[in-house]
Image (tube, grey):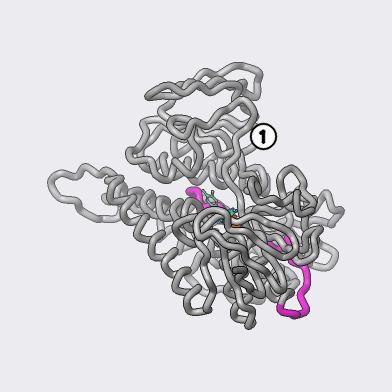
Amino acid sequence: MTNEYDVIVIGAGTGGYVAAIRAAQLGLKTAVVEKQKALGGTCLLWGCIPTKALLEHAHALKIIRNAKEWGVTLGPDARVGIDMAQVHSRKDRIVGGLTKGVEFLFKKNKIDWIKGTARLTGGGTVEVFEGERQTLKARREIIVATGSQPRSVPGIVVDHQRIITSDEAIHLKDVPKSLAIMGSGAVGVEFASIFNRFGSQVTILELLPRLVPVEDEAVSAELAKSFRKQGITAHTGARVTAARAAADHVAIDAVLADGSTLSLTTDYLLVATGRGPVTAGLNAEQVGLQMEKGYIRVDTLYRTSVPGISAIGDVITMGTPHPQLAHVSSAEGILVAERIAGHAVTPINYDHVPGCTYCDPEIGSVGLTEHEARARGFDVVIGTFPFGVLGRAKMAGETEGFVKIVADRRYDELLGVHMIGPRSTELVAEATLALRTETTVEELIRTIHAHPTMAEAVGEAAHATHGAAIHS
Ligand code: FAD
């Protein structure tokens, strides 16, 4: 028997499950095929949620280590350590609660979760060939949201024991004495912050000339300064040439920026060099989907080359680099569901996608970097304000970093906001709304920022853009 639905979603990550909920809200009979035992995909199971839970533990440890500064007394045995069993148990409770929450939302919205692995079989059909085997028919649309998985680089073989990816790093039972991290994108620097705080000796090996290479150059420089202070070793312009795993260590060879060689032995090598699409076994090419390097090619409304099949999230490409972020996949999922339901939709402006990196200090950014703005020919003006002079930052004991505004002098147009420092991953929300609503710098200046807050740094950076910061 073929079960018919209006919409069939393959994959229940933040793209797929959000698309399904929105489709169901709009009256479309919806099923989701998901092969994992829990809903939520990378973000909930191996990504955003478990890593940020670990970071909160690292933050708690930092505060307790500084107990004296805070006037907190610890009793006779003042030794402070980390109990990884408790860390994992709390993290797993959080993950479990959230995945169950998605299950509840599926029930509430009458979405069928078909447990199994799906492949496309053409003519609007999907075959579930592992798990609850059956054939499903989509009356309106199939949405492919199969996501991504860790990817290594040629010559470096992940053995999942000593040469690991983020999937294993979130489960490490003990704190490694030493950890090398290949790649300093969001995943790399977040794990560097976690394990440095837990007590590991962390070495970052980044091929490009600076840390967090997609961020504004000033942000990269500030992070490098902070990591140095915290005792994290970071080699930029460093190419890992070999990694050999043994039973209890990894031997790593690298060529550094100055041409010298580095040989390093660490407990683990975490390969954080990016993620590739999950399309193996999906039958994508066979049903006629246009592919690019394994990614599914879509247009600006997420239509593939085959009518009746859309794709969203980490698995897609539009021909230019596509941000692999949970909130991007969700926004795409909502847009696709609304399009299928017949709503008028407009393409997402990817210049307005906020990026958050939860290293210590945190990074939040949206819009054009200074370099990008100059390259696009804007008459660039910059305003920067340091967190260090803010009362709220002093109270929190987190005085590193700044807010940097990139604007166009001609029309006072806000082009980008880049911040590194306390609560930056929250503060970026204001900047995102400002960009979305095409706010000028003047309007940001006239927006009253409450005192004492970290958000004052955003207002002050706007003042600084007009050469009139009050407190610096
Ligand atoms: P996924 O979440 O990968 O979901 C795809 C789902 O499809 C999976 O559940 C998979 O099991 C299922 N699937 C695949 N093939 C099939 C099939 N054939 N049949 C049935 N089911 C199938 N993003 C942020 O925005 N903020 C963060 O802080 C953040 N932190 C991260 C930290 C780490 C360590 C990692 C790895 C990623 C992080 N991300 C973060 C990225 C974010 O997790 C992804 O961008 C997001 O999960 C992509 O969602 P998706 O729905 O496209 O795919």
Of residue 192 and residue 144, the one placed in the foreground of this image is 144
Q: Within 8 Å of ligand 1, the CB of disc 1?
A: no
**397 with respect to 9 (left or right):** left
**148 with respect to 407 (left or right):** left
Residue named by callout 1: 208
Visible residue check, residue 402 = no
Q: Which residues are magenta?
A: 341-363
Of residue 268 and residue 259, the one placed in the foreground of this image is 268
Occupied quadrant, residue 406: bottom right
Which quadrant: the C terminus? bottom right
Query: Which three-letter amino acid code belongs to the residue tagged 1?
Result: Leu
- Residue 331 in magenta stretch: no
- Residue 357 in magenta stretch: yes
Q: Position of residue 121 (x, y in %)?
A: 70, 57
Of residue 224 and residue 246, the one placed in the foreground of this image is 246
Q: Position of residue 373 (x, y in %)?
A: 79, 54
Which quadrant: the N terminus? bottom right
Which residue is located at x 46 percent, y 54 percent? 45
For residue 140, above or below residue 186: below
The quadrant of the rendered image in which ligand 1 is seen is: bottom right
Occupied quadrant, residue 410: bottom right
Residue sitting at the far left: 76
Which residue is located at x 55 percent, y 67 percent? 455
How many residues crowd mark 1 within 10 Å: few (<14), some (14–19), many (20+)? some
Which residue is located at x 61 percent, y 77 percent? 29
Visible residue check, residue 124 = yes
- SS type, badge 1: loop
Which residue is located at x 68 percent, y 70 percent? 138
Q: Position of residue 440 (x, y in %)?
A: 75, 71
